[in-house]
Amino acid sequence: MQTDSRLTRLDETRVRINNPHGIETTLFASEQVPVESVAVTELIELLDLQTTARQFAEAAPDSFDRPPEISRVAVTPDFHKARGIPVGTVLATRGFMVPQAIGSDINCGMRLHTTTLKPEEVASRVDDLDTAFRRIFFEGGRDIPMTRGQRHAMFTAGLEGMLDATADLNEGLWPLVRELGVADQLDRVERRGSLPAGRVFGLSDFMGEEGRLSRDGQIGSIGGGNHFVEIQRVEKVFDGAVAHAWGLKPGVVTVMVHTGSVGIGHLCGSHYRDVVRKIHPDKLKHPANGVFVLPEGDRHRSHAESFWDALHNAANFAYANRMFLAVMAVAGMRRVFGDHVGCDLVYDAPHNFMWRDEVDGEEVILHRKGATPARGFEAMAGTPFAYYGEPVLVPGSMGASSFVMVGQGNAESMASASHGAGRLLSRGESMRGFDDEFRKFMEEFRVVTPTDLRRPDVRQRPDILEKKLEEIKQEAPFAYKGIGPVVNTLADAGIARPVAELTPLMTIKG
């Protein structure tokens, strides 16, 4: 790790980030984990929220139910610069929330299934799978019809509401959803994928006409950037008892999904970026860091309540989106191998969301920006994970290993772990050079995209080919930190314990 005078190493896995506000801020990173100086700067500037909130309270005291404070900050090993709030930041606040800490990709998260396929079956039919996946993911094959009322149930009651409302729907993917037992595995989804919302925010046109089935372009979409659906195999088991309980035996083929609320979350995030600017007291200058607060007191209670509804609308959609993407992957496998292909859910959890939680004995709003919950077995009482701890899904970069870990409920990290390896290079930097590495990667690894890179006519169009390859290159392995030091830090710090390593067989990218 590079030397930075603003960092004080506490031990082999913990670093204190010194800041002018004196806020307890712990970065979990061993010496082998690269730490960007620009990310440290961005985080310290973010902590000026403390001043913003206090000045807001002085200018409009009835905006807060209690004195606003940042209680504590933890930073995970995949820490890197983003847009005002670094990825890997866990922020506990009292008396206010920070919508910008979550941004537009509300409830971006991970979902993992085991399947009944064997790795050699996938390897022997990779071209056929490529064709089947492209058809179902990108060429109009997803087929997920819903009525306005059914979408309303999804937005206001999540997976439970949507599955109840579609119990008799037998078109498109719905029979497969029921055959795969999605409704019976909701206890393997964080908060059952079902968050209550009193209304649907700004989505009237999207929901369609009453009583009429329609198909939309959002549900079942992967999105861009580092989102993916990946077919993997269990390569190695580290904790036999936990791996056995979760169905992670060596050689098992898995489906990992990484995505969020796509355009639905963008609507909510954009709206509340405007709201927090408008309610900022006129007598105060706008924060230099561009990050505003949303108080929970009387004056702006209606805004706060509407925000929670909109947040839950988008989060419920994201849970449904990940579920459908996994079902679509199984549908693609069945087109190639037959209807005997089955799957079981391991876990589904967000890594970009807000929770009402308790930290140091007080109620806080816990913001996780690119950080996944990693609760211990006591916090998982009443779930299938009560004897082990929470599954923690830590994906590597495209083409690299991913890890399944089990949460230890580490108090200092606020029971939070990395959501991946973390970027080493910006998307722009990854485009400059690395041509030999990227060429070798594309020769050795199958990436399924909306554009079929195997087609002769595509290969004769260098403009189309170059554009798609540029998008893939931004997410290639050399653009990310090594996953090993990140996983080792999580384990050595007592945040999460390794259960199994998954290696990729092929990746589907939007």
Image (cartoon, helix red, strand yellow):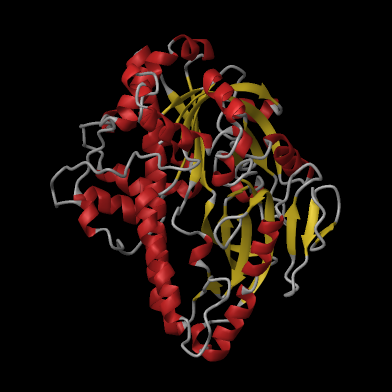
In what quadrant of the picture does the C terminus appear? top left
Going 40% across and 39% down the picture, which residue do you hit? 222
Tell me where residue 65 appears, x and y as whole percent. Answer: 53, 82
Picture layout, residue 170 above or below residue 67: above
Q: How many marks?
A: 0
Q: Is residue 317 left or right of residue 394?
A: left
Q: Is residue 89 left or right of residue 141?
A: right
Q: Residue at x 44, y 15 (%)?
A: 126
Residue drawn at point x = 85 percent, y = 56 percent: 10
Classify residue 378 as left or right of residue 136. Answer: right
| Residue 489 point in image, percent of width and height | 75, 43
- The residue that appears at 43% across and 42% down in the rendered structure is 224
Observer able to see residue 339: no
Q: Please provide percent x and percent y for residue 429.
A: 59, 44
The quadrant holding residue 453 is: top left
Locate residue 54: give its quadrant.
bottom right
Position of 266 compared to 68: left or right?
A: left
> Looking at the picture, how far across and down is residue 57, in whole percent?
56, 86
Query: Depth check: 368 or 162 in front?
Result: 368
